[in-house]
Image (spheres, rainbow, N blue to C red):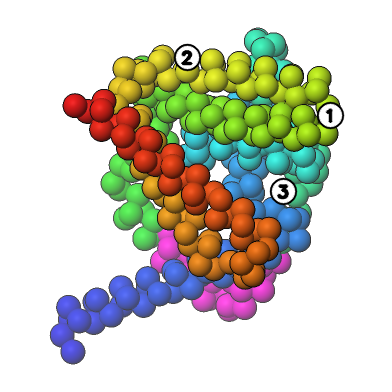
Amino acid sequence: MSKDQEFHNDIDIIMRVMRHAQAAVKSRFIQEIVPKRLTIVQFNALQHLHWYGHETGMSISELGEHLGLAHNTTSGLVSRLERHGWVVRRRCDQDRRRSRIKLTPQSEELFHEAVDHATNFWQSTFGQLTTQEQENLIDGLKRLKQIMAKPVWPSYAQLHPRDADHLKERFEADLDELAQAKLKLVGMRLILAQIAEKRDEHELAAYLNQAASEEIRHTNQLLVLLGHGENFKTLLSTLVQEDRVVYEELLALLEAAPYAEDDEELVLLQQMVQDNQRYRRWFRSVHKQTNQ
């Protein structure tokens, strides 16, 4: 075996050992959070709040940037954590309109427990090496760290620039996601209004219809603000494409439906397919006319 082959074999061994070590640490990590009914993403959020917002807390936008998540996604994540007692929202002293996300005593206790769990983990793994083996491993890792630390790795600030253009793009992306979320709210409110009417809850139905109307106005204003209103043809084309996706999903559901032909569920799906075909024909016709 040549020296090059031996070298590459050694590197392969090192990489495999590192992967196994990482898998063992991740396994311990998962065993630690599963009993707490936390997902990995939720625990990551708590970790970032523990590391970077321990004293002052973090805003939704700051936490979202650390996690690489959009504003609405982060907001939903925080709401779930708050509902289960892991975080709390506190009004910012400098601006009472804004909130800061902080850990609760329940979360603080989680990180205290994590230190004990980590100690037990390393005692049962690294602790099995002899004193000499531990010293040799530490010396080797320290030397490897010195060599690998020579390149200037990008900092968090460099990876997540906060210049004006970046902040504008991030803000516009958050506004776009907000517009999409509001579109869903419109549909939910209109459906609930119809249900309320059938239950003779006319006041509630009127309120839901009014709220849906206002959501439509807000969404339209957001789309115009983002410049989407100027690109009507593109939006209409997107609608035609989305209709096709829904149509294909309906057909797939019909094929997989475990019901007899006269069952209510199957009849409903068949009616939805017929309605969707009608929508598609009409929107395709309108889309064709706008492109002429």
Q: At 56% from the left edge and 37% from the top edge, which residue is drawn?
A: 73
- Quadrant position of the C terminus in the picture: top left
Q: Give whichever of 85, 149 is nearer the camera.
A: 85
Whether 122 is drawn above or below 169: the answer is: below
Q: Quadrant of the N terminus?
A: bottom left
Residue labelled with disc 2: 221
The Cα–Cα distance between marks 1 and 2, rounded to whole angstroms, is 33 Å
| 169 and 179: which is toward the camera | 179
Q: What percent of the width, then of the height, locates residue 89?
A: 73, 27
Sort mark 1 into few (<14), some (14-19) or many (20+) by Cα contacts within 10 Å.
few
Magenta segment? 118-142
From this viewpoint, which residue is outermost toward the bottom?
A: 1
The amino acid sitting under disc 3 is: Phe
Say whether residue 264 is magenta: no
Q: Amino acid at mark 2?
A: Gln
Instruction: Label 2: state its secondary structure.
Output: helix
Identity of the residue furthest to the front in this view: 262
Residue 190: image quadrant is top right
Of residues 156 and 174, the one drawn nearer to the viewer in this rendering: 174
Residue to which mark 1 is pinned: 200
The residue sitting at the right extreme is: 200
- Give the mark nearest the N terminus, 1 or 2: 1
Q: Main secondary structure of the magenta part?
A: helix
- What is the crowding at mark 2: few (fewer than 14 residues within 10 Å), some, or many (at least 20)? some
Q: Which residue lies under the disc numbered 3?
A: 111
Q: Please state which of the two labelled residues, at mark 1 or mark 2, is closer to the viewer.
A: 1
Asked if residue 180 can be seen in this view, the reply is yes
Nearer-N-terminus badge (1/3)? 3
